[in-house]
Image (cartoon, helix red, strand yellow):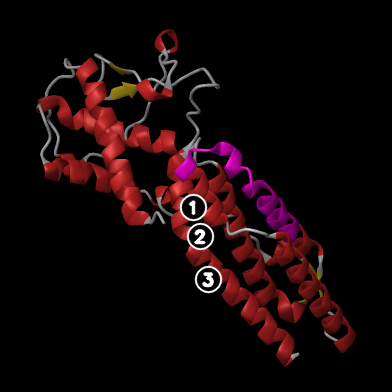
Amino acid sequence: MPNNKILFVLILCVGVVTSVFLFSRNKSAGTNTENTANITPKSYRNIDENTNKDWKNILVNVDTSESATTILTNDDENSFNETTLTAQMSRDFLSQYLLAIKNGPLTTEDSDAIARNTLSIEGYTNISGAKYLATNLHITTKSDQVTLQKYEDTVNKMLKIRSLEVKEDPTTIFQDSINSASEVRLAKLDPIILSNKGFLTDLLSVEVPEKAVTVHLALLNASSNILSDLEGMRLVFVDPVRSLTAVGQYNNHISDLKTAVENIAGFFAQN
């Protein structure tokens, strides 16, 4: 199963291959005047009159009035979505590469430094779901046995119903769709995603005793991270960086969810 190390290698390879393609189209890029290890992602400006039409062949134009390289983005929503995590990482990686390549081919150390710089941005390797706070809950100050029992029965019912709705392991669906290059098979994730959204809605709508807020929020936020991972997996053919990150995090988030369930069960046992 893909993890952060595999993601690192994948992005490095894809980035280098793509960068070589781009450099072959732009040999007049200039000379290198910067230390690669200190290069940071630059800002980008669109050039309206010359935008690319194919995300596999991202065009590059060197702005002669400035030292920065401009990555041209695509105005065709059917062929390139510049808001995806993959597109953002590509721009970060390529901007650093094109600045460093001005003085000729890069060393292995240079390439490693560029990859490390890009992946040092936590948003590429650590994606979480929406973070919920106590203010998002319907909290009651009642702590009598009737209120606590009602809360316990409701949560247990939610857990049972939603768990029965998940018929297949999401990672198996993901792997199967990748192996077969089939987005149709990937659609099996849709009912699981829908079920997880329903569980979040359930947790947000239930009346939570004040003394149960901590364990309830832990369950809610663990479920939110799972939903984020599932939605990321669903985008593997559109946004592979986000998708591989989601798969790499999924087992840890499942572990967090199990811990949250155990903790809320412990709360019920003590109350």
Q: Quadrant of residue 195?
A: bottom right
| Residue type beneath disc 1 | Ala
Quadrant the N terminus occupies:
bottom left
Res. 131 visible in picture: no
For disc 3, the marked residue is 255
- Left or right placement of residue 49 versus residue 205 in this view: left
For disc 2, the marked residue is 250
| Gap in angstroms between the C-alphas marked 1 and 3 | 14 Å
- Residue at (45%, 44%) from the top-left corner? 179
The residue range painted magenta reads 179-200
Tell which of 190 and 42 is nearer to you.
190
- Residue at (71%, 92%) from the top-left corner? 270
Tell which of 134 and 219 is nearer to you.
219
Q: Is residue 53 above or below residue 101?
A: above
Q: Label 2 crowding class (10 Å Cα cut-off): few <14, some 14-19, many 20+?
A: many
| Gap in angstroms between the C-alphas marked 2 and 3 | 9 Å
Q: Secondary structure at mark 3?
A: helix
Q: Quadrant of residue 26?
A: top left
